[in-house]
Structure formats: C-alpha cells, structure tokens
Amino acid sequence: MDVVDRFLENAPSDRLEFLRARFDAGLAWVHFPVGLGGLGAPREMQQEVERALAHTPQLDTGVQAIGLGMAAPTILAFGTEEQKKRFLRPLWTGEEIWCQLFSEPGAGSDLATLATRAVRDGDEWVVDGQKVWTSGAHHARWAILVARTDPDLPKHRGLTYFICDMHAPGVDVRPLRQITGEAEFNEVFLTGVRLSDDLRLGEVGDGWRVAQTTLMNERVAIGGAPVRRGGGMIGLVADAWRERPELRTHDLYQRLLALWVEAEVTRLSGVRLREQLAAGQPGPEGSGMKLSFAKLNQALTGFEVEFNRDLGYDDWAFRRSDSVDFLGRGPGYRYLRAKGNSIEGGTSEILRNIIAERVLGLPSEPRVDKDVPWKDLPR
Amino acid sequence: MTLLYTDVEDELRAAVRDLLADRCPPAAVLARVEDEPHDLDLWKTLARDIGVAGLLIPEEYGGAGASAREAAVVLEELGRAVTPVPFFTSSVLATHALLQAGAGELLRGVAEGDLTVALVVPFSVSPYREVGGAVTVTDGRLTGVVSAVAGADVADVLLVPVDGTLHAVPAAEATVEVTPSLDLTRPIATVTFADSVAEPLGAVDVGRTLRFGAGLLASEQLGVAEWCLETTLAYVKERYQFARPVGSFQAIKHRLADLWLDVVRARAAARAATDGTALAAAVAQAWNAGVAVHVAEEAVQLHGGIGMTWEHPLHLFLKRAKSTELALGTPGDHRDALAELADLPGPVRAEPDRPELNRAGLS
C-alpha cells in the first residue's frame, strides 16, 4: 500500500483537512475515477485502504449513510462532470449531508405512483408536493429527489430525477415523531421550490431508471456491512448472556443458540457476496442481504428485551437525533427501531417480489396500472 | 480461505453432473430403489473414470490428495441426484477413519475403487457423545450388534471402532442384514459380529471422524435443497390454476423467495464447513439439515397432489433430507455443541431446595 504510506507522510492533522486530503489522494472510494475521490482501482482494494487507515479520522457513517450509500453511486453513474466535481467531495468529507426525497404519503412500496410535480419554467423547474419518511432531512444540505414531469404518461415513464437544494425557499422540513419517541425522520413539504436545470440528474423522463440505481445501492448498503464472527447485534446479546447468568433460562437458551447459528450463516453469506463482488461476479445474493438482516435483527432485539426483563426505557423525549446510534441506546430502543428494518429502503414484501421475479424468474402478478396514464390512475 | 468455488471445483462439478444427468436421472433412481438401491456400475464409473473414490486419499496411496472442498462439491452433485452410491459412507466417513488409523494398504484399494469400506456406527450417532460399547474384542475377535449402519450392505470391509482402535473385518466375517430404511437411497443395515476375525489397524478418534463427516454432509444437504427448490420453481411456472401460473401468486412467490434465502445461506455455511473446524461443522449442520428438510417439505406442499405420489421423485429427496437431519447429530445436538465452541454457556442450575421456602409454600 505505497499510495497509503505516501499519503500518510504528508497528511494534515486537522480532521476535516485530513478527510479532504484523503479524498484528493484517491483514497475515498478507490474504484471511483481519479479526481473524484478514487484511483480507478479494483473495488476490493478499498478494504486494504480501510485497514491501513483504521487509526485515522473516520466518516460518520450514520448521518452520512444516504449520501455515501445512495447519492454518491447515483451521481457517479448519471451525473455530469460538473455535478460530480461539485458534489462528491463535500459529500464524502461530511461537509454536506444528504437525504432522500422519494417516498410520499400515497407512494411508498408503489414508489412510481409518486405525485410531487416538477414543471419546467425556462432554465428552472418548479417543484410542488409532499415527501415523507425522510431520514435526516433536518441536517441535510442536499437531497436526491424523484418528481413527476409528465402526468400524461404511464407512472414509470413520466418521472425525472433531481438534486434538491434543501436551503431553497419553499422547502419545509417538519419532524415526525416515531415509535421510539425521537424524530429521526421527517415530512418535507415542497412549495414552489425552484431548482435550476443543472440540478437535474439524467434525462427528463428517465427518473425511474436513475432511481433503480439508487435503490439497488441502498439495499446493498443496508445489511451489507462486514462484521466479525459473533460480532454486531448477536455479539451484544451474547455478551449480555455471558454476563448475566442469573437471567438465563432453558427456553431462551434454545432460541439464543438458533439465533447465533442464523447470525453466523447470514454473516457467511455476506462474506461470500463481498467475495463475489470483488471477483467481479456479482451474484443475486445481494437482493437477499437486506431481507435476512431485517428478520434477524428484529428477532435479536426482541430476544434482548425479553432476556433483560427490564420494563424501563432509556429516553422517550421527542428530540431530533443527531446521528444513528443503534448500539449505543438501550434494548427497548433497539427493539422498536428494528421494526423499521423491514420497511425502510424497500419493504420485505417488495424485496421478496424482487427475488421471486428477478432472481427466481417467477411471473409477476397481473398489473392493471402499467400502461395507464398516471393522471388516470385511481388514487 | 474463499467461500467461492475454484475453477478446479467447477470442472469437477461439471464432470460429475454430466455423468449423473446421463446415468442417474431421478426416474432411474426411482425405478431401482425398491429392489437394488445401490447403483454399483455407476459407482465404478464415478470411482475410476472421474476418480472420486480417492479424492481424500493422499497421492502416496494412489488417491488424488484433494481437500474437503472438492469432496464437498461432489457431495452437492450426489445430493442433487440422490445418487445411490457409497461415496459418503466409504470415501468420506470410512476413509477419514482409515487415514487416522494410518491404514495405507486398505486406502490403496479404496482409492482405486476396487474396495468399498464402511464405518460401523449407527448413522444417527452424535459426534459429541461417546461411541461404543456395542462391540467387544476378545483375543482379536469381535462380538456384538450395531444397528442402522449406512453403507454396510455394499462394503467389502467393515471398519469397527472399539475402545479407540479401528478394526477391519471382512464383510464375509459378519452378518449384514438390511432393514427397511426411511431413506430408500441410502439403505441401513444391522451388522452382527459373532467371534468375527478382525485386524486391528491403529488408533482412531471416532468423534473427529464424525465431526468431519457432519461438516461435509452439509454439502449433500445443500444439493438436496437446491434440487427441491429448482424443481418446485419449474413446476409453479407451468402449473396453471385460476387462469394463472401458480407461481404468479404473491403468497407462493414469497415462500419461494424465503426458501431461496435459506439455500443461499446454506451454500455459504457448507463452503465454510470445508475448513474442517468443529465450529464451522456444527454451524453448517445446525443450519443445513433444517433447510434441506424445510425446502423438501415445502416442495411437497407446492407440488399439490402430485407431490404425495410415488411416481414423482420428490419423495426420495424428502426422505434423504429427513434422514440426514438425524445423521451424525441432529440440529439440536450441533447447536448444543456451540455452547462450548462459541462460548455460550447454558442456564445455571437451580439452587438446591430451600426447606424454609418449601415449608412456607405448604402452609
């Protein structure tokens, strides 16, 4: 890793300056092009870079998750050179946080039904509508946005993808208090928001295809993180089990052993998936990682509450979360927050449909909405 | 170690799969299974032409000197076809015991495919418990009865562990009585020794051999599950009800997606178990045994009435899956073993009776 050694020789000590320099050295995403945080190198080199830089300032992967996992790969795939130059560096260093304006009150799993309108006005677009379940919109400087630009076309075709300026007049972010008590996500009202045409990502009308890139990256990002054997959530549960012998029961023991096995085989299939990606043979396993992660995490968090026999809760305060701190909060919080794992980023039902149709080749359900103009669909 | 398949493994798989497609389609297995289940002609071809019998045997004894990884790939293919050959019993389980005992000359015969051997233990034995007691040695002769021995019916030499020593007994020296078995494609037999002449071969830790076998059996279970899933997918695409393919109903699709996810994880577990560690073997058996049974049971259900008939080969796979769930330790046995292997101690025993509480409770 000569390139890492050379970088470390002259690296600044200030955290932000360090991260900027790391981006400029091509050590942000090694597989990205030179000048855009990368070296045009094979993806598997990233792991070595991470190991070599483990003791240096790190990104806040909680609050930056949407930028890193979803916005960046989409900008790389569909952005103009100017857009890539403008957005990728501050996104990676965390100077600019991103959120995702996709879901709407009437369009969740059926995302292509979305109703937020963008109407062209010279070199600008005027956006009106309401988005919901927007994680981190309260810190976000930018958003990725899908809006309807032609209501006369069937629902998948009249969509366009934009970068939304969250500081623009007409953007109103309102907290949504969640099952956990806090407000990690928001409703976002867009009223006459003017976005210049150079914030459009991809062609007019091509928004669905661009969004597919985002969504596929999202599902790999959720649940795809490498963990060591017996680490992560099962590690937390197993540690508690070892430390509190007085709480152990035979019934819980059988479930713990089964969950440990499930956690281990799920981890192993994640290892296998990353090996496939590194070898350039991405397998269909990717679609399944988020699904198995959600099921396992929900079972483990439910187990944890039961094992602890604790009727308390750490904090019900209605507050804005600064970051995602899943493991830092109490068991009750984890139990409730994990309920979102099978909903956010594509429900488990939608993911099962994707596996069934695209991996297993099963026929789709009869569709009545595919060729009907969006404006004529019942809503 | 990688969890992917190497090019060599892919080539081996292709050779075995081609041969089985030609010589061992499900209809052929079904046709012979009640009269003469083992297909020894096929076994000779597999052993001699592809060289599978000696995969795990070092080159100095005429084997291929391959690793558990290659044997695992062969087992996947044999599982996919419920192939009635003694590969697992002779070339994996018994061969591992022979290697431990240092029995080079016998290994040479096994590697060439001329000699078939079987380890004389009940096939449902747990690798985590003491094995033995059923057979005793007196003046170099064996006496005793062992039931539910897999592969004994076609073995030329029986390998009997007694008190930490492996003994070789020519099949003619023992009585081998085949009994009806749940898995028609892997018959079991009761083996009786009555003052049978035996040759001590060397020391053996049977538990080690059984754990090694359990880890590899996970690959066979993976093959069984894969065949059941693929066959069911093909069926629900072509079977119409309510003027639609059955497989277009979301209720069916979601079940199949979940089965696929179980199989994906079974593949990773089976690959990991070829590293030979006790922990990886326990994890793979605890997971894969259940997956094979679950996928086979779902396959029967999703085939509707045809799934319950003798004419559809599905039942052979269900029977293989359910039998291997018990073979070399149940999933529960393997989960129990994780207590130590993964440092997950069990519940603390309840305190001894506290008489004052008991009295209070009675009053």
Image: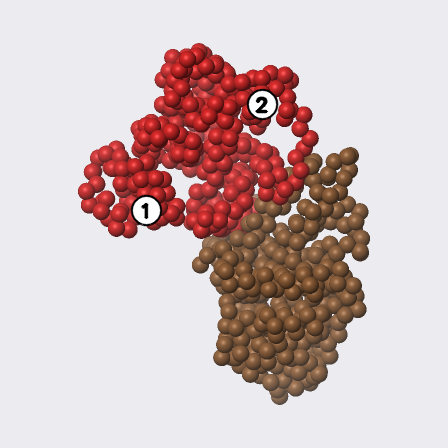
Chain colours: A red, B brown
Q: Tell me which residue sits at (80%, 56%) in the image.
A: B310
The amino acid type of the residue labelled 2 equals Lys
Where does the image place residue B73, in percent across and percent down from the top left? 57, 61
Height in image: B133 above or below A79?
Answer: below
Q: Quadrant of the C terminus of chain A?
A: top right
Identify the secondary structure beneath mark 1.
helix
Please identify the residue farthest to the bottom as the structure is shown.
Answer: B139
Residue A138 falls left or right of residue A237: left
Chain on which label 1 sits: A
Q: Which residue is mark 2?
A: A155
The image's mark for residue A49 is 1
Give B342 or A280, whichever is nearer the viewer: A280
Q: Tell me which residue sits at (73%, 59%) in the image.
A: B26
Classed neighbour count for the residue bearing mark 2: other residues with Cα under 10 Å, few (<14), some (14–19), many (≥20): many
Chain on which label 2 sits: A
Where does the image place residue A53, in percent across and percent down from the top left? 29, 45
Q: Tell me which residue sits at (62%, 67%) in the image.
A: B88
Q: Quadrant of residue B201?
A: bottom right
Q: Is residue B58 visible?
A: yes
